[in-house]
Amino acid sequence: MWRNLLFSDSSYGAGAERTPCLHDPTRAELYKLTCDLVANDQGSLEQIVRLNYELFPEGNTRSLSPWYMRLRKSIDGMLLDEYWADRDRWLRAPAGLVGLHNLSNTCYLNSLLTQLFMNRSFKEFVLRIPVDSADPLRANSFHLRVLFSRMQASFAKAIEPRDLVESLRDFAGDPIDPQVQMDVDEFFNLLFDRLESEMPTSELKSAFRSYYGGQLVQQVKSNECSHISERTEPFSAIQCDIKGKHTLQESLKAYVEGEIMEGGV
């Protein structure tokens, strides 16, 4: 019951038979049943304590749950009390969404990765990228695919993007420092530059660019004749003004509004 229904060994969700129960009232009843089963059985009690210790190591004081501490006290001869583990802290929400741990100052990174993950078509594209762990030239793509897989299938409350962060190199070729706050737009350009360079075929490169990017067209029109001068340039992101704007549509409309140029050329 503990392994199959409360805390499955499969943190990646492989195998439907190993999916733990995520329904709050049912988990509460399972906890109570566990307490009833071990209340008068010292051997079973010690076994549950050991299993709980695997989840909440003693060296990490933040990881010790009140439920675990009460079980420890019961072994020392104290009376059994109410037993519980804070599900909201350790197990993913019933909605099925998994968070990302902040490695130090990586809130910008977590915010961007979460936004990319919530784009279903882009997530599916990443999960289909044909790379593996044995290919060092495509490490960023591989670790992003693994991270998205864990965010989709893990039962944990949150997971660490550490492998992806450690695989990334900035434009100078240096490792990303989790303790240094980076501009999210700069990180977006860095991440997509690295991912695009790792696409194994031109078709995948083209498909990758189609998700976040396009062509900006700058036009110069004359008020005195019909001549129009145009210039195009690629983009992967645009910066919209949000001050005084109530919707994204308002920001985009303001972004493409023209301006009158005066004076000679």
Image (cartoon, rainbow, N blue to C red):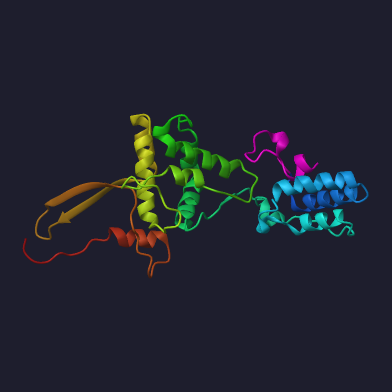
The quarter of the rendered structure image containing the C terminus is bottom left
Query: Along the line of sight, which residue is nearer the eye, 34 or 180?
Result: 180
Q: Residue furthest right?
A: 40
Q: Which quarter of the rendered picture does the N terminus lie within?
A: top right
**Residue 70 shown in magenta:** no
| Viewer-side residue, 183 vs 39 | 39
Number of numbered callouts drawn? 0
Residue at 67 percent of width and 33 percent of height: 15
Query: Percent x, y for residue 41?
Result: 92, 46
Residue 146, given in percent of the width and then of the height, sits at 52, 38
**Is residue 148 left or right of 136 when viewed as pictured?**
right
Specify whether 77 is left or right of 5.
right
Above/below status of 153 relative to 131: below
Quadrant location of residue 253?
bottom left
Name which residue lies at 55% across and 48% down: 160
- The residue range painted magenta reads 1-20
* Residue 101 picture location, percent across and down: 55, 53
- Magenta part mainly helix, strand or loop? loop
Percent x, y of residue 88: 68, 56
Above or below: residue 212 compared with residue 182: above
Residue farthest toward the left in the current orientation of the protein: 264
Q: Check residue 15 for magenta coloring.
A: yes
Out of 29 and 227, give the one closest to the viewer: 29
- Does residue 211 appear left or right of residue 229 in this picture? right
The residue positioned 78% from the left and 43% from the top of the image is 2
